[in-house]
Amino acid sequence: MRFGVDIGGTNIKFVVIDGNEIKYKNCIDTVKNGDAIVGDIITEYNKVKEEYNIERMGVGIPGDVRDGVVLDASNLGLLDFPLASELAERVDIPVRVANDADCAAMGEEIFGGTKDCDNMVLVTLGTGIGGGVILNRKIMQTNRCSGEIGHIIIDMNGRQCACGEKGCWEQYGSITALVRDAVKACEENPGSILCGIYKREGRMSGRLFFEALDANCPVAKQVFDTYLDYLAVGIKSVDMVFGPDVIVLAGGITKEGEKILNPLRKKLPQDIRIEVSKLQSDAGSLGAAML
Ligand SMILES: [Zn+2]
């Protein structure tokens, strides 16, 4: 059996799997400190190892990982943190650590709705755009950062990105970008349904945006159409570079399913297969277990 851990900014997810079967699942709050994270993982492992015959542990973490060392997970306050060896010292099984988006892609590859595909790219739409690339059923890894598809540049004179470049895809196709564009449209169209919802709630979110779309707000429809253009242009680039059998979209907004997929497919060449993740936030821990 395998123990999978997915460390996120908000919570840490745990899973025990036996073959393809999930035996155990749990989730705790994340304490953003390396020693606390190690302590919490060990506590959980000690709890489950009594009941399950666990042979290996895999951990996914949002940041750059090289040879088990977390080079930079600034969101969690970790820099040059030797996570794999810190854990391995306290357990009697092998421990592997990888980037969380790569783990999620592996989870989709093995447990998701596109198991038939040897090559896939997972595109996670959230605060930014994350990605994991699976080639010939293996995580694509190099000695440098790879799979950072959110930073494909789609406009060299475009919006400033936190990475230092201008015009990165995630500045247009992330949920943060959609919400920002929706707020801008509200300011320009104060009489719209979208703006009514914005004023009512005092904020904008993906869910509130879809409420306006469902109410047939023409302003929201226009924002959404432009957003889908942004998504499509990045997806076409991803397809050209990696030539995957399928591109799987994940993240809260993709729970809208066909409301996104249908119009998005119309903006893409027919031979690009796109699907929505069936595993969503479970993909990371499941993929980590398979490291
Ligand atoms: Zn960038």
Image: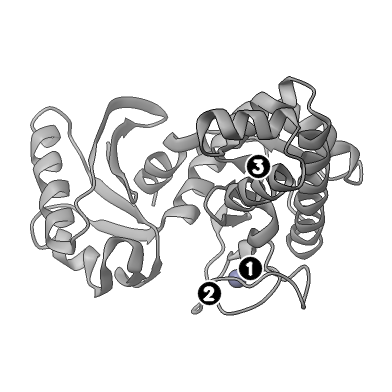
Q: Nearer the viewer, residue 23 or 131?
A: 131
State yes or no: Cβ of the residue under disc 1 lies below 8 Å from any atom of ligand 1. yes
The spot of residue 118 in percent (x, y) is: 66, 47
Q: Residue at x 55, y 56 (%)?
A: 128
SS state under label 1: helix
Q: Amino acid at mark 1?
A: His
In primary-sequence order, the first of circles 2 and 1 is: 2
State the CA–CA distance, disc 3 to disc 1. Answer: 18 Å
Q: Nearer the viewer, mark 2 or mark 3?
A: 3
SS state under label 2: loop
Q: Is residue 98 left or right of residue 113?
A: left
In primary-sequence order, the first of circles 3 and 1 is: 1
The spot of residue 140 in percent (x, y) is: 56, 63
Q: Residue at x 54, y 48 (%)?
A: 126
Query: Can you identify the residue that label 2 sits on?
Result: 142
Q: Quadrant of ligand 1?
A: bottom right
Query: Can you identify the residue that label 3 sits on?
Result: 248
State yes or no: Cβ of the residue under disc 2 lies below 8 Å from any atom of ligand 1. no
